[in-house]
Image (cartoon, helix red, strand yellow):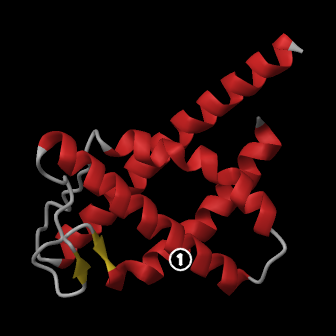
Amino acid sequence: MFLEKEEKTIDMLIRFVIYGFLGWGIEILWTGMGSLLSGDKRFQGYTYLWMFPIYGSAVFLEKLHDMMIDWPVLFRGGVWVAVIYLIEYTSGQFIKKIIGICPWDYGNVKYAVNGLIRLDYAPAWLVAGLIFERIHLLLDRIL
């Protein structure tokens, strides 16, 4: 019984680290593409150390994915958009409360909400949620 619980904890920690690093990598690619599209030929991408635990916490969304695995893809995508907005908004508020600033400040953008989320990112978050589902299924097979 104790060993099962310990193995489950180790599995969750491994998944946390995998999601954290994948999130960082995807964000670096995303910001790099943004810089390239803005004319920066250096193709410079970046992320924030604060993001690792936020991305890593995707491990706690696996149960939600298991619950809605048979739902239509667009409905699941809509759920992911809402969940990602909720996480981005609340974690942004939390970090802002701790250090006085949110690392991602969307304040000057047309579709920003309190500088913490961007409504025009909904399609990207839908795709990100569906990619998360594939990663979750892959991790279930290999871990």
- Using the image, determine if residue 119 lies above or below residue 102: below
Q: Position of residue 32 (x, y in %)?
A: 25, 62
Residue lying farthest top? 2
Task: Indicate the quadrant containing the N terminus: top left, top right, bottom left or bottom right.
Answer: top right
Q: Position of residue 124 (x, y in %)?
A: 44, 76
Residue in the picture at 69% in, 52% down: 62
Residue in front for this viewpoint, 122 or 47: 122
Residue in front for this viewpoint, 84 or 93: 93
How many numbered badges does the structure rendering display? 1
- Using the image, determine if residue 121 lies above or below residue 55: below
Residue lying farthest right? 1
34 relative to 64 in the view: left or right: left
Amino acid, disc 1 = Leu
Q: Position of residue 97 (x, y in %)?
A: 20, 47
Residue in the picture at 77% in, 83% down: 72
Q: Position of residue 10 (x, y in %)?
A: 67, 22
98 relative to 142 in the view: left or right: left
SS label for mark 1: helix
Q: Which residue is mark 1?
A: 126
80 relative to 66 in the view: left or right: left
Residue in the picture at 82% in, 44% down: 141
